[in-house]
Image (cartoon, rainbow, N blue to C red):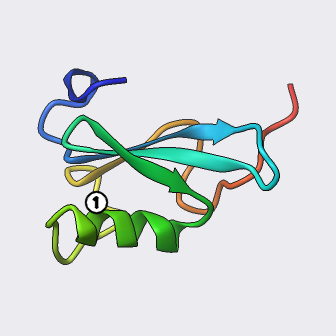
Amino acid sequence: MAGSESPGVPIVVAGVQHGEPPFRIVLVNGEPVGEAFSFVDVIEFSLRSGLEHVDLDDPSVIRWVGGDKFTWTRQST
């Protein structure tokens, strides 16, 4: 899941991964920067990576895979 999947979108938050607690991998500019356990972690990783004023609802800034900013548990299939 490199930046090529979402050209121009600096932040990609992958789908929920199995874990205790579950988490989502965050990529900034195509590089993995950490495991997020809430949207607060996404903001922190973004700021650490040099991005400022991150709007978690702006699709030109962030792409949520497998759910939105409120999705932090795996969906039953």
Residue receiving disc 1: 58
* Residue at 16 percent of width and 74 percent of height: 52
* Residue at 78 percent of width and 56 percent of height: 21
Q: Residues within 10 Å of mark 1 (few under 14, many from 20)?
A: few
Q: Looking at this view, is 68 or 4 the one in front?
A: 4
The relative height of residue 35 versus residue 47 in the rendered view (above or below) is above
User: Residue 61: horizontal and vertical position, in percent?
Assistant: 22, 54
Label count reads: 1
- Horizontal relation, residue 38 to residue 64: left or right: right
> Farthest residue in the right direction?
76
- In the picture, the quarter occupied by the C terminus is top right
- Horizontal relation, residue 33 to residue 65: left or right: left
The relative height of residue 31 versus residue 44 in the rendered view (above or below) is above
**Callout 1, which amino acid?**
Asp
Quarter assignment of residue 53:
bottom left
- In the picture, the quarter occupied by the N terminus is top left
* Residue at 28 percent of width and 64 percent of height: 46
User: Residue 4: horizontal and vertical position, in percent?
Assistant: 20, 22
Q: Looking at this view, is 34 or 70 the one in front?
A: 34
Quarter assignment of residue 38:
bottom right
- Horizontal relation, residue 20 to residue 33: left or right: right
* Residue at 35 percent of width and 64 percent of height: 45
Mark 1 falls on what kind of element?
Answer: loop
Quarter assignment of residue 56:
bottom left
Q: Looking at this view, is 75 or 3 the one in front?
A: 3
User: Residue 11: horizontal and vertical position, in percent?
Assistant: 29, 49
User: Residue 54: horizontal and vertical position, in percent?
Assistant: 25, 70
